[in-house]
Image: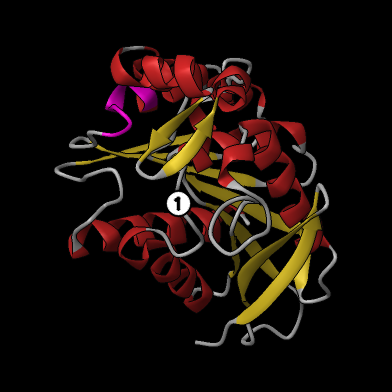
Amino acid sequence: MTMEYVEFVSRGYTLRGMFHPCFDNKSASPAVILCHGFTGHKIEAHFLFVTIAKYLQSKGIAVLRFDFAGSGESDGEFSDVTISGEVDDASAALDYLIGRNDVDSGRIGLAGLSLGGGVAALLAERRKDDVQALALLSAVASPARIISFIRTGKFETQLANWGYLDFGGLKVSRKFLQDAEHHDPAGAVAQFPKPVLIVHGDEDSTVPLSEARTFQQARRQSPASTQVEIIKGATHTYSTLEHTETVCRLLGEFFTTHL
């Protein structure tokens, strides 16, 4: 399958990504933006985003997967990453797709993994007129709750002494933690008036299954347009062939139906 290297600008940073076009369509095609997780990138673990992109492309849906500023191959430093900044970056990605002649600007969806799911939720609510469907994969519903563990033990000591955390060899700044407390992806999903797919593994040890239930509860006023899929035995990144295939199928069915 063909793909195209792309660049666009957000907040003064050059962001880099890969666009998977659909050549089967004579007219402009629907498209989906993939938002990677915290410390992740446009390929993701075991090439998950590449696999998803190729699968959706085979179903007639174009895909843009890109690196947020400070991550992967995009400009910027990871120590400057905040959720607010990533929402702005995802908004720039949306503008980029809208500007392409081979993309139908009225048929664009978002999908996000982990914290990228929280980012996608926040963007969907912000730009509800431009986003037609939202898929949440192992997504963070309450960033403040998920990062609460950082406030204890060695991480709290690092914050006090250095002003940042050594998180797997990456600097996580105090401003990231402070900014995260002001975001409510679950509340954003409650305000998003269009279809939402919630996917989570029941063996996710990174983002607990309770986050999916929080999203589901937030959608209680829109049950008819909300699909919840709990994958038995699946980990945070769906790290078996069977679970990856299930995620691809669910995304393909969801976006084919709603875009």
Which residue, as the protein is rendered here, is positioned at the far front?
Answer: 161
What residue sits 48% from the left and 53% below the top?
254
35 is higher (above) or lower (below) than 195: below
Residue 128 placed where, x, y %?
74, 37
User: Picture quarter containing residue 99?
Assistant: bottom right
What residue sits 62% from the left and 68% below the top?
17
Question: Can residue 131 be seen?
Answer: no
Whether residue 210 is in magenta: the answer is yes
User: Picture quarter containing residue 180?
Assistant: top right
Residue 169 placed where, x, y %?
38, 45
- What is the quadrant of the C terminus in the image? bottom right
Numbered-mark total: 1
- For numbered disc 1, what is the local secondary structure? loop
Residues 209 and 216: in front is: 209
Number of other residues with Cα within 10 Å of mark 1, as a class: few under 14, some 14 to 19, many 20 or more? some
User: Would residue 257 appear left or right of 108 to someone viewing this image?
Assistant: left
Which residue, as the protein is rendered here, is positioned at the far left?
Answer: 233
User: Would residue 40 appear left or right of 20 to someone viewing this image?
Assistant: left
Residue 138 placed where, x, y %?
37, 39
Residue that label 1 marks: 40
Magenta-tinted stretch: 206-211
196 is higher (above) or lower (below) than 184: below
> Tag 1: residue type?
Gly
Residue 161 placed where, x, y %?
46, 18
What residue sits 18% from the left and 37% below the top?
203
Question: Can residue 33 be seen?
Answer: yes
